[in-house]
Image: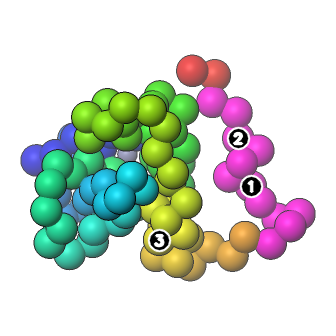
Amino acid sequence: MRTCIGCRTRSEADGLLRVVVVHGALTPDPRRRLPGRGAWLHPALECLHRAERRSAFPRALRVPGKLDVAAVREHLIVANGIRETPGSVTDESKVDPS
Ligand SMILES: [Zn+2]
């Protein structure tokens, strides 16, 4: 069992995406082969957004400062088959009261 750093829900590791830091950038590690400390995240943009807002990546990975989540976002978009076209973005418009 692993805890998603976005929503903090415990899940089987199989249902979570491993994310590591490579050269200062967050890197998705779906095969779980990259060395080093990993953070676990549901393969969902909502969990990524939550993790970003809470600065969960630097904390989970023990890296100071902000980390670039672009590669992870890209991975999730491809994995979920989401097309980010202007005017049809629904995910960003959701406001999380926390
Ligand atoms: Zn989650």
Assess whether mark 2 and mark 1 are in contact (beta carbons under 8 angstroms).
yes
Residue 94 badge = 2
User: Mark 1, residues whose alpha carbon is within 10 Å: few (<14), some, or many (≥20)?
Assistant: few
Q: Is residue 18 magenta?
A: no
- What is the quadrant of residue 31 in the picture? bottom left
Is residue 12 something one can see in this rendering? no
Indicate whether 95 appears above or below 82.
Answer: above
- 55 w.r.t. 94: above or below: above
Q: Is residue 4 above or below residue 77?
A: above
Q: Which residues are magenta?
A: 85-96
**Residue at point 54%, 69% (across, down):** 74
Place of residue 18 in the rendered image (x, y in percent of width and height, measured from the top left): 26, 59
> Which amino acid type is shown beneath numbered disc 2?
Lys
Residue at disc 2, secondary structure: loop
Sequence-first disc among 1 and 3: 3
Q: Position of residue 25 (x, y in %)?
A: 42, 56
Secondary element under disc 1, as helix, strand or loop, is: loop
Q: Are marks 2 and 3 in contact (CB under 8 Å)?
A: no
Question: Which of the labelled discs sits on residue 75, or is there none?
Answer: 3
